[in-house]
Amino acid sequence: MSTIELKYGSRSFACPATDARVLTADVPPAGDPGPLIRAALDKPIGSPRLEQIVRPGEKVVIVTSDITRYTGSEIYLPILVERLTAAGVAEADMAIVVALGIHRKQSETEHRKILGPLYGRIAVFDHECDNPAELVYLGDTEGGIPVSVNKRVAEADRVIVTGTAGYHYFAGFGGGRKGLVPGVASRETCMATHFAVFNPPEIGGKSEQARPGILDGNPVHANLLQAARMLEPDFLLNTVLSPHKEILGVYCGELEQAHLAACSQARALYTVPLEEPADLAVVSCGGAPKDINFIQSHKALDYGVGALRDGGTLILLAACPDGFGNPTFFDWFQYQDLDEFEQALRQRYEINGQTAHATLSKARRFRVILVSELGEVETARMGMEKAADLDQALEMAYEKLPPRPRTVVIPDGGTVLPVIRNS
């Protein structure tokens, strides 16, 4: 019997694959990332070269993602600094701000991983979304969203935003504008921009356009972009990564144009078409850090159910050593009726609550069996069933599935988006 190794945290499970279709991205082999990065910097999209933008004596802030979103930062940040230095910017005039959004602060070890050889050379600061002394108000968007952002970023002479472009479950894609909003925005701004996931009250429910891979007509994307533009970023660098976290593409230039180019490559690489829905999907988030907590792991759940028929079963391998990922997330499961849950969110919106609502919605539409370090009570409250390991999860799944169920296995569920043709 053939098997495939599925990552779970820092280890893996062997999954039977004889009668299953394995859904993976058909990606080219990764080459040396250095030339890719330098070539993208040499030919930015919709923007002058970085060397033509910055001036000696200017304060330059580089915004980069936190440890929950690997981007290749330890590779591209030194090259960015190399370019800035060559343009006459002193290292003492540079700072790196970690775009935490509403996430926790990073440890010294995590800063070292993010900065690579720059650690100790370039000052690094964690964004603080709840600290008024570290925020500045820029004004309201056309839609009336108040935009407050990191003071260090707002007051810099030049702002370079970095990240990686991949699917996002309701903003369409990560990367681009998300490095700034929610990355370095206040909690209030984060919540206000994301609230557009819901339709107006008279319609109810969630916007059909607020889903993975959709940017045109996506109200959340529109809010994020408009708010991010208020920071007037000078330059973008976004990577596109392989499932093994290798750099496959690099896009530099103007905030939106370079991001759209990165999204185009990500869409081409990571959309996997299916002719018919499956009965069972076995999904790994892709291992650490993609399953560092449940909020991050939810991406794999959201994408994975796209391969299933209604009522189908999904096994999710998500270690979650950091638990839920935010102290308020689990509190939202006090609401077990989805209509009441939505009304509570409309009255007091939180991004964590939105993710909790999306989790419970999927757990009610599909059978979800979770293999994680989370407890049985917490798992059940989220609408899912707990299994100790993959073998037990498969036994549980087969008890309620038809003989020889149509099965898909997704080794990197946080990256691959299954799409059923004509669905």
Image (tube, rainbow, N blue to C red):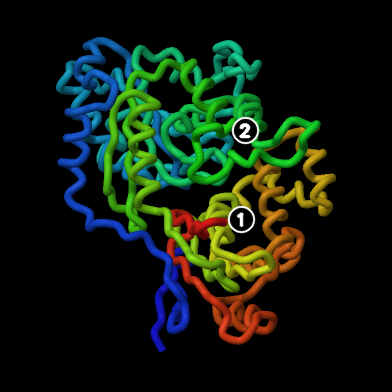
- The quadrant of the picture occupied by the N terminus is bottom left
Q: Is residue 201 left or right of residue 10?
A: right
Residue at x 25%, y 10% (from the top left corner):
57
Which residue lies under the disc numbered 1?
Answer: 323
Q: Earlier in the sequence, mark 1 or mark 2?
A: 2
Residue 322 visible to an observer of this rendering: no
Q: Is residue 300 above or below residue 392?
A: above
Identify which residue, 172 or 187, lies in the foreground: 172
Q: What is the number of the mark on residue 194? A: 2
Where residue 374 sits, quadrant-wise, is: bottom right
User: Which amino acid is tagged 1?
Assistant: Gly
Q: Position of residue 85 (x, y in %)?
A: 19, 23
Q: Residue at x 55, y 46 (%)?
A: 169
Q: Nearer the viewer, residue 6 or 10?
A: 6
| Secondary element type, mark 1 | loop
Residue that appears at 40% across and 29% down: 63
Residue type highlighted by circle 2 = His
**Place of residue 257 in the rendered image (x, y in percent of width and height, measured from the top left):** 35, 27
